[in-house]
Image: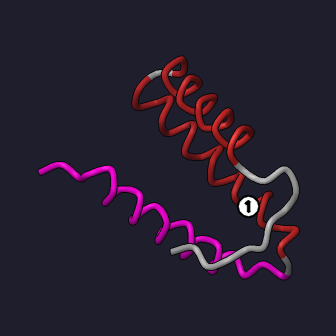
Amino acid sequence: MSITQQQAEQLAKKAVGDYLNACNLQDASQIGDVLMKLCSVAGVLMANAEGSEQAFDRLLGTAQFVLKSMPKQPAHLGRVQ
């Protein structure tokens, strides 16, 4: 049985929310550092599963999406759902 993209996204949101809560951060300025650690670990795992070039291409695509689509300045943070 395969997971759908929508199911994977919902699980990822829950995992990130649980991870951030477990980090017990003192303020929003710490979020970037701990999320980068999560991205780093995921990138290494992806490279081991698919190869470094495939992982690089996927992470670059995500970085380009973030640069193009997300706010240039910090935005109000809501709950991760």
Q: Amino acid at mark 1?
A: Val
Asked which quadrant contains residue 34, the reply is bottom right
Asked which quadrant contains residue 65, the reply is top right
**Residue at x-position 48% and y-position 22%:** 54
Label 1 crowd bin: few (<14), some (14–19), many (20+), radius 10 Å: some
Q: How is the image coloured?
A: secondary structure
Residue under label 1, please give it: 34
- Whether residue 79 sits left or right of residue 25 in the image: it is left
**Residue at x-position 46% and y-position 61%:** 12
Asked which quadrant contains residue 53, the reply is top right
Magenta-colored stretch includes residue 6: yes
**Residue at x-position 85% and y-position 62%:** 74
Tell me residue 37's x, y (percent). 69, 52
Name the one closer to the observer, 30 or 67: 67
Asked if residue 10 is positioned above or below residue 53 in the image, the reply reads: below
- Whether residue 6 sits left or right of residue 19 in the image: it is left
Label 1's element? helix
The secondary structure making up most of the magenta span is helix
Magenta-colored stretch includes residue 69: no
Residue at the farthest top position: 53
Residue at the farthest left position: 1
Tell me residue 45's x, y (percent). 49, 39
Q: Which residues are magenta?
A: 1-26
Tell me residue 40's x, y (percent). 65, 44
Name the one closer to the observer, 57 or 47: 57
**Residue at x-position 72% and y-position 50%:** 70
Asked if residue 16 is positioned above or below residue 68 in the image, the reply reads: below
Name the one closer to the observer, 9 or 71: 71
Tell me residue 72's x, y (percent). 84, 50
Asked if residue 14 is positioned above or below residue 57 in the image, the reply reads: below
